[in-house]
Each structure stands twice: as C-alpha cells, then as structure tokens.
Amino acid sequence: MMTFSVKDLKMQFDGTTIFDHVTFTVQNDDWLTITGESGSGKSTLLRIIAGLVDATSGTITLDSKNQWDYDISTYRQDVSYAVQSAQLFGKTVRDNLDLPFQVRNQTPDVNRELTLLRAMDLPESFLDKDVHELSGGQRQRVGVARNLLFPPKVLLLDEISTGLDAETKKTIWALIQQMQDRYHFAILSVTHDGEEIKHANAIMTLEDGEATINERTN
C-alpha cells in the first residue's frame, strides 16, 4: 500500500504566511481535491509537493521516505505534475511522448503512445504532428497523456481543464479516472469546477492560511 504524507507544511513569502500546518495523507485510489479562493496557495502547495518549490517548514514523505532523500528524477516519476497549460517541447508530439521512456532509459513504445492518443480522442497521425500546430485543447491532451504513459504513485493536477471546452474536459477526465481505476494511484487536484470536484473522495479547503479536510461519502 502506497502512502504519501504531508505534515505541518508551512509556506511564507516576504514575511507573509501563505499557509501553515497543512497535514494530510493519501493512499492508493484516493482523490483529494484542493479548493480555495485565488491566492490561497493551492498551486503553491502542489508545486512544493512536486519538488519545484521549497516549503518554509514541514515534511513530505512517500512510502515513509522524505521527499528530499529521493533522487529528484525518481521522485518526479513517482509524483507526476500536470499543469494548466501543458508545456510541450521539441518539434512533434512524438518528441513529447518519447520523453518518459528516455528518462527511464527505455526504448519508446509506439503502441503505448498510440493507445493513449486514441484514448484522448486524437488520431494516430498526431504522433508526428508539429506541436506548434496544435490547439490549446490538443496540447493539453498530449500533456496529460505524457503524464500517464508511466502511471505514477501520485498524480498532481493543477487546474488542467481550465479554459477547455466541455467535450475535451470529458475526454481528459474519463481517461484519468480509467487509469486510476486500473493502476490505483492517488490524485491531488486543484480545480474550481464543480463537476470535477465530484470525482474526489475528499475535499481540502485552504482559507486564511489553514487547511480543512472534509471526507465525501458519495
């Protein structure tokens, strides 16, 4: 059983406390959605968890091992971070889907790449499509597919569907739910979308620097 824990996490910036005493634990199949007003620190919290920003104090552990005791590349493979506007690189979609294999010193598996493209309702021909020719929704689907080629232990989702049309949202969330059902990873998501919040089995609200968690039964 995978266990991911955040304990007494505190973040200050220029003398101002963004949040304090943030504590929670998630395990396989958990889905914790983080809500709160703009500026409450939701995205900052995810960036700290992703290993992109240092907290002022507190601890983060994955399977009882401190975040900073991991090789950072290994940690980021286990705790994968998807952002609002996917950052694609190189020339083609293939360049982006090959990357998760390359960082693991593996030969890219074209069949797996094509399977995820189809699941994202993108044609196989997109594998060699120039990334600069993609729409915003297409870029986001490729970015999320890249995160899911190797299912992590914890998937971080930072408002990944903001600005997308309803059909694209439905496609992305259906795949994420399907992959979680199959691979049993935990999800930490930030969203303002009421429909997306329904996916969660727990809601954490950041307000006035404090975190409140409510378990969901439906």
Image (cartoon, rainbow, N blue to C red):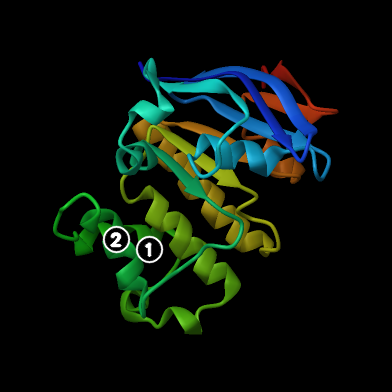
- Residue 97 located left or right of residue 10: left
- Find disc 1 in the rendering and name its residue: 118
Against 75, is 5 above or below? above
> Would you call the spot at circle 2 few (<14 residues within 10 Å), some (14-19), or many (20 or more)?
some
- Residue 84 located left or right of residue 123: right
Question: Residue type at mark 1?
Answer: Arg
Along the viewing direction, whichever of 194 and 37 lies nearer the viewer = 37
SS of the residue at dot 2? helix
On-image quarter of the N terminus: top left
Residue 190 seen in the figure: no
Q: Position of residue 24 (x, y in %)?
A: 59, 18
Question: Residue type at mark 2?
Answer: Leu
Q: Position of residue 22 (x, y in %)?
A: 67, 21
Numbered badge on residue 170: none
* Mark 2 vs mark 1, CA separation in Å: 19 Å
SS of the residue at dot 1? helix
Residue under the image location 70 percent in, 26 percent down: 203
> Is the residue under label 1 in contact with that under label 2 (CB below 8 Å)?
no
Against 126, is 149 above or below? above
On-image quarter of the C terminus: top right
Numbered badge on residue 99: 2
> Would you call the spot at circle 1 few (<14 residues within 10 Å), some (14-19), or many (20 or more)?
few
